[in-house]
Image: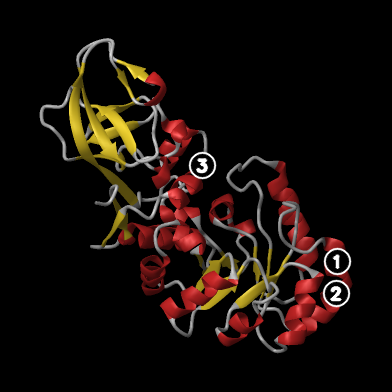
Amino acid sequence: MATGTLTIDLDAICANWRALDRASATSVQTAAVVKADAYGLGAPRVAKALAQAGARNFFVAAAEEGAALRQILGPGPDISVLSGHMPGDTDMIGDLDLVPMLNSLDQITRHLETLPGKPFGIQLDTGMNRLGMEPDDWAAVAGIVLEARPHLLMSHLACSDMPDAALNTQQLDTFRALTDGLGIPRSLSATGGILLGSDYHFDLTRPGIGVYGGQPFANARKVVTLSLPVIQTRMVEPGEYVGYAMGWQATAPTHVATLAAGYADGLSRALSGKATVWAGDTPCPVLGRVSMDMIAADITHLAELPDALDILGPHQGVDDLAAIAGTIGYEVLTSLGPRYARRYSTGATA
């Protein structure tokens, strides 16, 4: 038996991508980031849906992800690899027409020597200090690289979900200083950058988390519902405990449901005693500790015994659950475990 049912609304994903496409400036292309198995939701179904919705540019983290995505999408769409051209990736990149975003002098040398004439992009570090070429290194090789006509010049914003952060404008200014007047398509913004306004859009935007219903895209449609089956129910008397380490003690007769999911399924132990599950519109508090495979919830107030309770749904999205656990929606999504039965819903797309 699966630990729960994860329902993924493909129409909501496509609606979110279209909304971010509309939010991008006129004439700007909108890509889709589908790294980490489409943020944990299943790249085969998600990428196909986004391609049908109009996405023609996709970004992944590693060449292996790009190879899998090429098998899904077939020839045609651009597939860019954010980690660049790593040792051992040459055949994959060349045979499958992947576009590595080169991050260093070593990667530039590797690509131009082993795959001359094959497309590539350049990632520049404008202040995040994670991936990308430093300005001095770029200045030293820009003339040679530009002769090979990069497919794209890109960078990544460190604080785009913090609109007032001074680093946003600093990175924008640095990116412009490094790329203005070169005549090469440019990309700076993921979801947060799109929402910062047209100054940040350039030629291509790369929404990720907003496509999947997460912040900072406040108007996103919710994408996932996670229902956890009830394995067993029991009455717990006053003074008795629920879960490991006597994590919760009853002060009154309490009807307790044990649900089939836990931290092995991506539901953080930090949710212990803090989270809520839902029977339709009725909240049910989580009792005691989240264990590896099970969660307990108080169902005393329910008129009928539930077959399942929702931990993600209309009343509690990924960012809500993340806030309870002290993390971010990205981690909640990408941690959803393989034991869930995954169902994909479609219908009329807004």
At a point 48% along the width and 84% down the height, the residue shown is 76
Residues under labels 1 and 3: Cα distance? 34 Å
Residue 11 visible, this orientation:
yes
Please, what secondary structure does the residue beneath circle 2 have? helix
Callout in the foreground (2, 3) = 3
Q: Position of residue 271 (x, y in %)?
A: 42, 32
**Residue named by callout 3:** 328
At a point 36% along the width and 24% down the height, the residue shown is 288
**Residue named by callout 2:** 141
Q: Position of residue 310 (x, y in %)?
A: 27, 40
Q: Position of residue 333 (x, y in %)?
A: 44, 50
Q: Are marks 2 and 3 in contact (CB under 8 Å)?
A: no
Asked if residue 169 is positioned above or below residue 123 in the image, the reply reads above
Using the image as rendered, state which of residue 272 and residue 276 is in the foreground. Answer: 272
Where, quadrant-wise, is the C terminus in this rendering? bottom left
**Residue named by callout 1:** 137
Using the image as rendered, state which of residue 31 and residue 297 is in the foreground. Answer: 297
Give the mark nearest the N terminus, 1 or 3: 1
Residues under labels 1 and 2: Cα distance? 7 Å
Using the image as rendered, state which of residue 241 and residue 46 is in the foreground. Answer: 241
